[in-house]
Amino acid sequence: MQPYEFQGNTISPLLAFEAPSPCTPKLLALEGLKALGVGVRPNIRENEAWDAFRNELKGHMVLFVLLDEAQHAVNIANRIEAQKIADAFKNLVQMPDWPVRLILAGVPPLDEFLYRCSTGGPLSGSRNSIVKVDSRASKKSLEK
């Protein structure tokens, strides 16, 4: 998606950034804010960071969030943090005034996390599609 001009402002409907490693829910929100060019105070609480991220997505008119290396966000031993991230993803796609669409790119265990979320987890009521791309197949298509 290409940026476009709207009322004298340049709008980028796609925000793409890489999940930090190691990753916590707070670090993920902070990385998203950083990708938007928004500075935050270092002692911000996790819930404040997510509130700010949601508000900034709306303010920047972002429609799609591409999270690369998304396995970093879910490849954690702590189930509570994995649940927080799943809930945060759900809150992004279900914002009543500005829902965004998530594109999560990564390697296993991302697919396991998405499967759990889509079968009774927090994202089960959301419209989602899981598309697996075999790395061998994609390399072959690049060679042609």
Image (spheres, grey):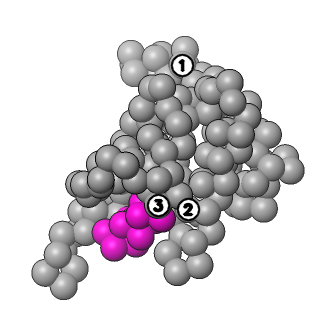
Sequence-first tag of 2 and 1: 2
The outermost residue toward the bottom is 7
Neighbours of disc 3 within 10 Å: few (<14), some (14-19), many (20+): few
User: Is residue 54 one of those drawn in magenta?
Assistant: yes
Q: Is residue 106 visible?
A: no
According to the picture, the residue beneath numbered tag 3 turns out to be 48
According to the picture, the residue beneath numbered tag 2 turns out to be 92
Q: Is residue 95 above or below residue 132?
A: below
Q: Residue at x 48, y 26 (%)?
A: 22
The outermost residue toward the right is 120
Q: Residue at x 18, y 69 (%)?
A: 10
Q: Residue at x 44, y 40 (%)?
A: 27
Q: Position of residue 58 (x, y in %)?
A: 40, 72
Side of 83 relative to 33 (left or right):
right
Identified by mark 2, the residue type is Leu
**In what element is the residue under mark 2?**
helix
Side of 118 relative to 137 (left or right):
right
Q: Position of residue 86 (x, y in %)?
A: 66, 48
Sequence-first tag of 2 and 3: 3
Q: Residue at x 42, y 60 (%)?
A: 53
Q: CA distance from mark 2 to mark 3?
A: 14 Å
**Quadrant of the image for the C terminus?**
top left
Residue 87 occupies which quadrant of the picture? bottom right
Q: CA distance from mark 3 to mark 1?
A: 38 Å
Q: CA distance from mark 2 to mark 1?
A: 29 Å
- State the mark number for residue 135: 1
Which region of the structure is painted magenta?
50-62
Near-viewer residue (114 or 134) = 114
